[in-house]
Structures are given as C-alpha cells and as structure tokens.
C-alpha cells in the first residue's frame, strides 16, 4: 500500500459522496484520480494520500475527521418516502445519507438535552397494511386529534404539533423535485423522525406532507419490512397515509359545516383558514360525498382552466411551518455555555453548513462572533487530529 | 366639514356610526346562518339553488327593518326593469346597498340602478379633490360579502365603486373590512375554530451531562 492516511474509513467516503449526490465517476473526475481509485478508497482496500484527502475534503465540503471514524449504524426500520414514483434511487440515497447525519446530530444533542416525551398514540393497528380498512383510517385520524386534545377545527401549526408530541422534525432541501418528505420510526430511541422538503412545495402542500408522514407513523409503525417503491403494498400504504392526512387536516364533522355546495371560489376563501390546498379540498369533498363525480370533474377542469393546478392562489402568502426544537437545542447549549459554538461542528465531525441546514439554524451560525454575554464553555473537548 | 376625494372611508365613518355598522354586520352573519338552517330541510341540490335567494331575501328585509328601527331613512327600491327590489339606506351623503360576490373585490353584476347610483362617485376618480358632502351629492358605499355558496361569510367589506368601470379595479382603493373592524363578532360566527398549537416546547439541559466529550 502506498503512503495513505492512517485511520481513513472507506465507507465514510461513500457516505459523503452519496450525501452530495455524486457518482464515483464524477467524484473521481473532481479529484483527478481514477474511478477505480475511488472504489478502492471506499472499500477500504487503499487509503488516499494526505493530498488527496485534502482534495476530498474540499470537494465534498467536509472536515478531515469526518473520514477518520466509523459511521454510526443505521436504523433497520423502513423509511417511508412521500415521493413520486419517478424519484431516482440516487435522490433517495442522497437524502438518506443526510438523514443519517441528522440522526448523528440528534444523538449528539441527546447527551445534553432532554427531548420531549413521545406522545404518538398506538391504537394496536395490525402490522399488515392490507388489514387496515378505509373507515378505520377516518376513526384513527379522529382519535389522534382527541389523544392530543384537539377539537375538529383547523390546526394552526402542524409542525409544532408534531414536535410538541415528541417527533424529531427537520425541514431540508431534498434536492429532488420528486421528493417531498419522508419519515422513519426509530427502534433505537423509539422516536418518530420526520423530514419535510423545503425546495418546491407550498406551505399548504407541506402541511399535507406532514400529515401524510404522521399517517405513516401512526398507521404503519409496526411495519418492519423494507419499503419497495412502486409495488402494490407501497402504493396502498401511500394511499392510506394520504387518506389519513386528509381526514386529519379536514375532519368530516367540521369541514362539512363550511359549505353548502363546494365551489372553487369558496375553497379559495377557505384556504387561509384551513391552510390546505384547494386541490385537497376538492378531493376531500368528493370523498365525503359533498360532490358528485360529475361535479368533481367540473371543478378539476375549472381548476386547470384557472391555471391553479400548477400555482394555486395564496400559495405565496402561506409560509412553510418551521420546526424549532433542534435549532433551539443548539442555541441553548451555546447560550448556557455548555459547548462553544465553533466546537460543535468539530465534535459532530460534520460541516457547519450541513449542521445548520439540518437543524434549521441560520446560515453561518457556528462562525458568528462570540457574543459578549456568551459564557465560557463548561465542557472542554480533546481535539481529534487527522493523523498522517 | 369637507373631505378629500382620497378618503371615502372617512366620509363613510363620519356619517354611519359604528353601532349601525356592527349591527348590519351581525345581521349579515345571522342571515347566512338562518338561511343555512332554512335550507337544511331541502335536498342538497335544491338547497344549493335556493340558499343564495333565501339569504338575500332575509338580509334585504331585515336590513330595511333594522335601519327603520334606528330611524335611518331606508327604502326597498325597484330596479330599472321593475323585476327586483333592493334595500337602499341613506345616511347623510352615504347611500348603501349590499351585494354578494365570490371573492373580495370582485366586480358586481352590471345593473342600471347600481351604475346610476355609482355615477355620483365620479369625484373619487380625481385625486385630492375637496368634497363637500351634501345630500344631493351622494357617495355610494357597497357592502360586498360572500362567497355566495358559503354557509358563513368569509369577507364583508364596505367598498366605494368607481362609476361605470367594469372589471376588478372598479373600486376605490380604500375599503373597510368589517371582519377586521369587528373581531368580536367574527368570533361568534358558528364555524370551526382554529386549534391553536402553542409554541410551548423548550429544550431542557440534562442534569447528568458527561464531563468530557466522547465520540459521536
């Protein structure tokens, strides 16, 4: 073996490459090495020279010590993607890798921060999704509201509701048009993790995504098989999560009080109140029998004529709901002087910009000048130096 | 006292006291609710067809009675074709009529009587003109509410129509939102109320923090 970097962990390179959405070929081009060299580094057969490692860090925008320790084991439970069937494997792998980093951040924070207890009710639903009936889903959505002491009115903030009940939530750029959100119930810490996309969807659509992921966490928590996209079981689970989200956000009992006969203009008027898309209100009205098939079809045609399929009115004025627990946890650690803010990326072995985006912190947070009131950190960490 | 042509809302408030504004707004809300209850006995399709007419009839009738009970000159006036009546309320130089539309600021259906009434709003077209409000120089104020098929109103605005300008810009930019002006009445509308999710979550530092950092 030529002079390499002692302690270099090959799988970390693969993880980093996939997190950045690069193929081995394109990484090799960016590094100026052969594709087989990249492959050898990733398998751990060879380790890169210090110069190549420096280049790797530059290209992948990660600190050297990221590559010097084993990545934590990943959770075995399935990840539910709210994605269109066209979402590429590459896109999913990219978000999964970054999700792994989010889990790393949460593990780090758990050492210092008490997380809220998880209050996601378990209604003893079967682990086989085919045994869950449509009528069950309406009831379950209602029971979740009751369990969280909610009436049937519009929910002011779904993201906060999920966080208040113990979900770990993050809003990130998922980097693929086809991916909207995903979730996983972790066996490791018995916590639901929900990641919402910030790239393209409107605020109302993202609320539906949040309801959809909540649906998976309630209906499919016991489902343990790997999720295979596009197979009938996956499609069924997606439909069930959709139905849950509709019923959760627009309960039959209260939504029926809003309209005599649904029209696009009425839905437009209701949109700021219920904070859901007009398209969802059409679908829900159809499900609840307020619209005949013919009426429903006419509304969809008129919706398209008005150009509302692509851009609905008020989408710009209804903001994305932002999670706040991870962000506040970091701010608390810094504020209380538990850890110096510039120490955190070092401890996490991640780029500051990644931690900021995964935790919904403002850009540049970790490199802001230390405030006069910021106390001397309580914990001093030994520095980990890249060897070689 | 005179006003600028830029401030029709001030002219309106000068003549129409808040109490009458509030009572008219509350009446409107109640008429939506009563019409819903009334139409509940019909089949859905029939109820849909009948609802806007019933609500309009209720409101036009009760608004006329309300104004008369308050000693405000009001009349049920015929339209140009003599096939429909509408309540017209006159307070000082303000002339008020009501109309349901689908969206806030939507133009109202063209009608000769409305256009005639709006003629006197010609002065709103000219900026910074001084207006001496007198009885023979009326200012048309339109109570615009809707949506028409809703079980409750989602907007109710006092609008000042510009004369004979069809289209979405047919109103003076000043408007009075009765929803914003009377929030307590809005709270009483029988409609699902928002479930407020409190921003109550605050991370807490653990009491058993390790003294040195371990690998993550």
Image (cartoon, coloured by chain):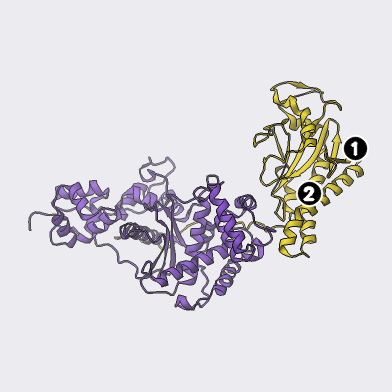
Chain colours: A purple, B yellow
Secondary structure category for the residue under label 2: helix
The quarter in which the C terminus of chain B is drawn is bottom left
Q: Position of residue A86 (x, y in %)?
A: 37, 59
Residue B109's image quarter?
Answer: top right
Q: Position of residue A56 (x, y in %)?
A: 21, 49
Q: Give the Cα distance between marks 2 and 1.
A: 19 Å
The tag on residue B28 is 2
The tag on residue B73 is 1
Apparent side of residue B136 relative to residue A339 in the rendered image (left or right): right
Identify the residue at horizontal 44%, vertical 75% (top origin): A222
Q: Position of residue A153 (x, y in %)?
A: 64, 60
Evaluate whether residue A84 shows in this view.
Answer: yes
The answer to whether marks 2 and 1 mark residues whose Cβ atoms lie closer than 8 Å is: no
Q: Chain of mark 1?
A: B
Q: Earlier in the sequence, mark 2 or mark 1?
A: 2
Residue A300's image quarter?
Answer: bottom right
The tag on residue B142 is none
Identify the residue at horizontal 14%, vertical 59% (top origin): A40
Is residue A158 placed above or below A265 in the rendered structure?
A: below
Q: Nearer the viewer, residue B124 or A372?
A: B124
How many numbered circles are shown? 2
Q: Nearer the viewer, residue A122 or B120?
A: B120
Q: Chain of mark 2?
A: B
Is there one chain holding both mark 2 and mark 1? yes
Is residue B59 placed above or below B160 in the rendered structure?
A: below
Is residue A356 placed above or below A194 in the rendered structure?
A: above
Is residue B36 placed above or below B172 in the rendered structure?
A: below
């Amino acid at each position: 073996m030529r002079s390499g970097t002692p302690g270099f962990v090959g799988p970390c390179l693969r993880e980093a490459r996939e997190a950045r959405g690069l193929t081995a070929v394109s990484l090799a081009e960016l590094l100026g090495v052969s594709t087989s060299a990249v492959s050898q580094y990733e398998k751990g057969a060879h380790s890169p020279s210090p110069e190549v490692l420096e280049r790797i860090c530059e290209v992948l925008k990660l600190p050297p010590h990221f590559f010097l320790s084993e990545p934590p084991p990943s959770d075995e439970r399935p990840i539910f993607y709210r994605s269109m069937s066209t979402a590429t494997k590459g896109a999913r792998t990219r978000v999964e890798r970054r999700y792994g980093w989010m889990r790393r951040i949460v593990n780090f924070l758990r050492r210092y921060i008490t997380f809220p207890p998880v209050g996601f009710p378990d209604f003893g639903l079967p682990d086989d999704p085919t045994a869950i009936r449509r009528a069950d889903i309406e009831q379950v959505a209602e029971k979740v509201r009751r369990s969280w002491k909610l009436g049937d009115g519009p929910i002011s903030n779904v993201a906060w509701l999920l966080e208040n009940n113990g979900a770990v939530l993050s809003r990130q750029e998922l980097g693929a048009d086809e991916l909207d959100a995903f979730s996983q119930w972790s066996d490791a810490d018995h916590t639901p993790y929900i990641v919402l996309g910030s790239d393209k969807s409107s605020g109302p659509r993202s609320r539906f995504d949040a309801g959809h992921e909540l649906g998976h966490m309630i209906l499919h928590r016991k489902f343990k098989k790997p999720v295979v996209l596009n197979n009938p079981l996956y499609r069924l689970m997606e439909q069930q999560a959709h139905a849950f989200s509709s019923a959760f956000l627009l309960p039959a009992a209260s939504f029926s009080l809003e309209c005599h006969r649904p029209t696009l203009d009425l839905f437009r008027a209701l949109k700021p109140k219920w904070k859901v898309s007009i398209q969802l209100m059409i679908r829900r009205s159809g499900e609840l029998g307020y619209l005949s098939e013919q009426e429903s079809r006419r509304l969809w045609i008129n919706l398209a004529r008005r150009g509302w399929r692509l851009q609905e009115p008020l989408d710009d004025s209804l903001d994305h709901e932002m999670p706040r627990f991870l962000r506040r946890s970091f701010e608390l650690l810094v504020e209380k002087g538990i850890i110096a803010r510039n120490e955190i990326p070092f401890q996490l072995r991640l780029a500051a910009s990644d931690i900021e985006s995964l935790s919904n912190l403002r850009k540049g947070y970790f490199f802001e000048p230390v405030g006069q009131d910021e106390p001397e950190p309580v914990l001093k960490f030994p520095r980990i130096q890249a060897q070689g | 006292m005179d006003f600028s042509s830029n401030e029709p809302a001030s002219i309106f408030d000068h003549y129409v006291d808040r109490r009458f504004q509030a009572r008219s707004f509350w009446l409107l809300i109640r008429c939506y609710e009563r019409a819903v209850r009334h139409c509940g006995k019909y089949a859905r399709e029939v109820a849909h067809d009948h609802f806007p007419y019933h609500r309009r009839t209720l409101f036009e009738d009760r608004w006329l009675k309300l104004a008369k009970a308050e000693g405000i000159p009001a009349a049920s006036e015929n339209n140009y074709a003599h096939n429909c009546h509408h309540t017209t309320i006159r307070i000082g130089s303000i002339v008020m009529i009501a109309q349901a539309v689908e969206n806030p600021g939507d133009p109202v259906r063209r009608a000769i009587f409305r256009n005639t009434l709006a003629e006197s709003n010609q002065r709103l077209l000219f900026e910074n003109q001084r207006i001496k409000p007198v009885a023979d120089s009326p200012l048309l104020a339109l109570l615009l509410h809707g949506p028409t098929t809703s079980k409750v109103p989602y907007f109710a605005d006092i609008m000042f129509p510009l004369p004979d300008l069809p289209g979405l810009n047919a109103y003076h930019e000043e408007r009075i939102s009765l929803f914003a002006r009377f929030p307590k009445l809005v709270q009483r509308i029988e409609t699902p109320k928002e479930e407020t999710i409190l921003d109550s979550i605050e991370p807490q530092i653990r009491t058993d923090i390790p003294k040195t950092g371990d690998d993550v």
